[in-house]
């Protein structure tokens, strides 16, 4: 999985738990420790826990990717998850305002969020039942063949002189 895909997946999972003000910052070329920041606001300590758990569980289940690092605690109101070069910051509104990571990394361009789950693959079209069609053709052919043979037997043979 590419780093941007990981960042967008984490943003989607946070959104599923009603996190707010979700942003992805592109730190490539600006930071030696991370390529992307995912910034997420959780409105309470229980939501902080729920967002963290949702991201960790779904990354493990759907992408077989556990976090490289889990840091912070609920009392600090700031949780960090690290997936390779993607850092997910889950903060309460007070901590997000206090630390102002968007201002600190003001030179970093913001990436477009894709909070829609990927479209499922299209359903395979059911093939037309060719076997039934072939069987019907064989039945019709079988009915016609005996009729031709019966007609040939009934016709009198021509005598040659």
Image (tube, rainbow, N blue to C red):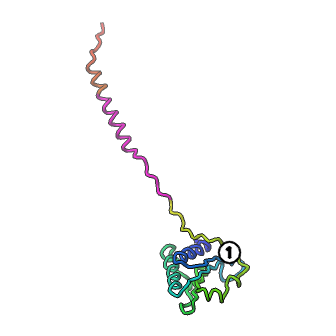
Q: Residue furthest top?
A: 161
Tell me which corner region of the image, top left, top right, bottom left or bottom right, holds residue 7: bottom right
In the rendered image, is residue 85 in sight? Answer: no
**Residue 16 shown in magenta:** no
State the SS at label 1.
strand
Q: In this picture, which residue range is highlighted in magenta?
A: 122-146
Tell me which corner region of the image, top left, top right, bottom left or bottom right, holds residue 110: bottom right
The vertical placement of 86 against 158, above or below, is: below
**Residue 134 shown in magenta:** yes
Q: Residue furthest right?
A: 107
User: Which residue is pictured at 31% across the width and 33% down the height?
Assistant: 142
- Give the quarter of the figure containing the N terminus: bottom right
Query: Pointer 1: what residue?
Result: 110
Q: Position of residue 94 (x, y in %)?
A: 61, 88
Q: Is residue 150 left or right of residue 118?
A: left
- Give the quarter of the figure containing the C terminus: top left
Q: Is residue 146 left or right of residue 58?
A: left
Q: Nearer the viewer, residue 122 or 159?
A: 122
Tell me which corner region of the image, top left, top right, bottom left or bottom right, holds residue 140: top left
Magenta part mainly helix, strand or loop?
Answer: helix
Q: Nearer the viewer, residue 15 or 153?
A: 15
User: Which residue is pictured at 65% across the width and 89% down the height?
Assistant: 98
Q: Residue furthest bottom?
A: 75
Q: Position of residue 90 (x, y in %)?
A: 58, 84
Q: Position of residue 9 (x, y in %)?
A: 56, 73
Q: Is residue 35 left or right of residue 127?
A: right
In the rendered image, is residue 34 in sight? Answer: yes
**How many dots with numbers?**
1
Q: Position of residue 39 (x, y in %)?
A: 62, 80
Badge 1: few (under 14), some or many (20 or more) residues near its Cα, within 10 Å? some
């Amino acid at each position: 999985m590419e780093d941007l895909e990981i960042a967008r997946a984490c943003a989607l999972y946070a959104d599923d738990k009603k996190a707010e003000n979700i942003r992805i910052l592109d730190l490539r070329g600006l930071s030696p420790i991370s390529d992307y920041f995912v910034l997420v606001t959780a409105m309470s300590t229980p939501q902080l826990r729920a967002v963290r758990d949702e991201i960790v569980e779904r990354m493990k289940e759907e992408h077989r990717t556990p976090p490289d690092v889990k840091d912070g605690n609920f009392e600090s109101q700031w949780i960090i998850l690290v997936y390779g070069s993607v850092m997910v910051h889950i903060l309460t509104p007070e901590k997000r305002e206090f630390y102002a990571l968007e201002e600190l990394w003001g030179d970093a361009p913001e990436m477009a969020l894709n909070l829609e789950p990927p479209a499922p693959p299209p359903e395979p079209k059911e093939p037309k039942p060719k076997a039934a069609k072939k069987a019907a053709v064989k039945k019709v052919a079988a009915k016609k063949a005996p009729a031709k043979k019966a007609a040939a037997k009934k016709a009198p043979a021509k005598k040659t002189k």
